[in-house]
Image (cartoon, rainbow, N blue to C red):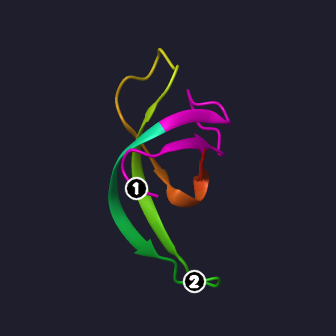
């Protein structure tokens, strides 16, 4: 994943339904999980598409996003 990719959010949160489309604006941090399975997680800033209540970027972990 990189900035400019279109993604689908797989985890619902307050004000964001599951399967919401979003555009990645930036990737802020890379974090390695300490517990198995060890994998790199990226903290992505995204802008929601078609959601009129949220205009500011939101942050999601890369394992909660799926490329479209």
Q: Magenta segment, which residues?
A: 1-22
Distance (Cα) linking label 2 and label 1 = 21 Å
| Residue 7 or residue 30, whichever sits in front | 7
Q: Which quarter shows the C terminus?
A: top right
Residue 14 position, x and y percent, is: 57, 32
| Residue 23 falls within the magenta-colored stretch | no
Label disc, if present, on residue 38 of the rendered structure: 2
| Residue 16 falls within the magenta-colored stretch | yes
Label disc, if present, on residue 2 of the rendered structure: 1
Other residues around mark 1 within 10 Å, as few (<14) / some (14–19) / many (≥20): few
Relative to 63, residue 60 above or below: above
Which of the two discs, 2 and 1, labels the residue nearer the N terminus? 1
| Residue 49 or residue 33, whichever sits in front | 49
| Residue 57 or residue 50, whichever sits in front | 50
Relative to 17, residue 39 above or below: below
Residue at x 64% of width, y 82% of height: 37
Residue 45 position, x and y percent, is: 38, 46
Residue 28 position, x and y percent, is: 31, 57
Residue at x 57% of width, y 83% of height: 38
Task: Report the side of 57 relative to 51 (left or right).
Answer: left
Residue at x 49% of width, y 26% of height: 49
Task: Report the side of 52 relative to 3 (left or right).
Answer: right
Q: In which quarter of the image is residue 58?
A: top left
| Residue 54 or residue 4, whichever sits in front | 4
Q: Which of marks 2 and 1 is in front?
A: 1
């Amino acid at each position: 994943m990189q900035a400019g990719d279109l993604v689908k959010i797989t985890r619902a949160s307050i004000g964001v339904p599951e399967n919401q489309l979003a555009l990645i604006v930036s990737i802020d941090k890379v974090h390695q999980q300490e517990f198995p399975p060890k994998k790199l997680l990226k903290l992505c800033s995204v802008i929601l598409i078609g959601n009129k209540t949220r205009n500011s970027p939101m942050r999601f972990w890369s394992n909660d996003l799926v490329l479209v």
